[in-house]
Amino acid sequence: MRDRFTVVGRATGCHLFEGDGTRPIDEENVHVKHTPKRVQFPEEIAAWRRSIEAEEERKEAGGLPHRWNNARFAVERVVVTRTHLSEEPVVSLALRDADYFDFLTTSLNLDSRPQRNGLTLRQQYLDGRDPVDAPSWMSCSFGVNVALETGKDGKMLFSRRSAQVAGPNSARWNSSANEGLARQHDLPRDGSPISLHAVARRALFEELAVHDEDDVRVELLGFGLDLVNHQWAAFFRAVAPGLDEPALRLRWTRGVTDKWEHDRFAFVDADPEAVLGFLADEPEERWTPCAPALFYLALVRGAVERAGGDAAGRAAVERAERKVLADRGL
């Protein structure tokens, strides 16, 4: 029901819901509405969740590795419109309460656990339907993904998720930094709306030790839906003019808040041919579904900037892609 983003000859598992990289989405045009009401599972699915919670509590009591629960959000709907005069994108995101065990209940069982009616969750709620309209309890994850460029040496940073991270994307190349919206961190106590830009900056700090004092420019480029794992994502590009690879690697040796989330990093020249070549040279199965779309949007944004803001600058990325395909006989 939804097309799949395609790059270097590969159709990914990501649907690009909004954005093409040519222009950022203004922060004031992103409206996040939170309803403090918990998602409700059908009774059979609720029993699956209770079994997950009991198993993790058993492992914790035994001093074994376990997953800890935290308060998150479920996506009720995502709506995109345009401003009246300049036709700038306006995004409305409606959220309600969920937690990490809610997410595990659906994400770990999309295909592997039939219900009593014989259908898996994917078969009943996603196949043959528009996944954008899935019930909110099927959408207990919203991730903010950031592509970081270092300004001093002109590198794009790729991060590989650690095998210790739960879920289907472990041990795969992903965005530079990624954070799921969490109520503890991202719901302002003063009642002001949730800021996706603030979540992007938190991701950069917690996973890469990039500080606000580093004067990082952060732009929201689009939204995507992981069709494989049914997870919503926001795509950001961040440019840090004063940082380079040696500076970041030095910081990481001194400690990072969420250092365990990644086990490998690759700094690649931030020009389109080098980045697309890296995408093509790493096997398809080593990528998360939406990372290629994120980095492509970041390349387009950089090309448009170099063209003085002309959206036609994106053609440079398409030319680079054709060269990558030709050089590799793809």
Image (cartoon, helix red, strand yellow):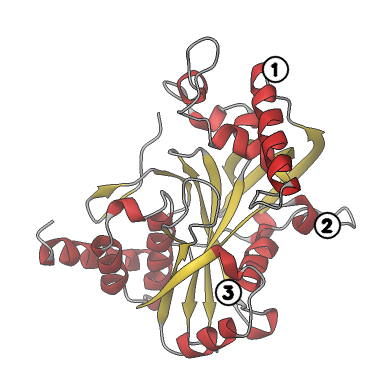
Marks 1 and 3, how far apart at CA: 41 Å
Instruction: Locate residue 306 relative to residue 195 in the image: left or right.
Output: left
Q: Give the residue furthest to the front.
A: 62
Q: Residues within 10 Å of mark 2 (few under 14, many from 20)?
A: few
* 224 or 328, nearer to the observer: 328
Query: Nearest the camera: 74 or 25?
Result: 74
Q: In this picture, is 150 found above or below 117? A: below
Q: Which numbered disc flags the more N-terminal residue, 1 or 2?
A: 1
Disc on the earlier residue, 3 or 2: 2
Query: Residue 167, percent across and down?
Result: 52, 46
User: What amino acid is found at the position of numbered circle 1 in the picture?
Assistant: Glu
Q: Amino acid at mark 3?
A: Leu
- Residue 130 position, x and y percent, is 48, 27
Assign a secondary structure to mark 3.
helix
- Per the image, the residue denoted by label 3 is 208
Mark 1 surroundings: few (<14), some (14-19) or many (≥20) residues within 10 A: few
Q: Residue 157, percent across and down?
A: 44, 73
Q: State the residue position of label 2.
A: 188
Residue beneath disc 1 = 43
Mark 2 residue type: Pro
> Residue at image x 29%, y 52%?
284
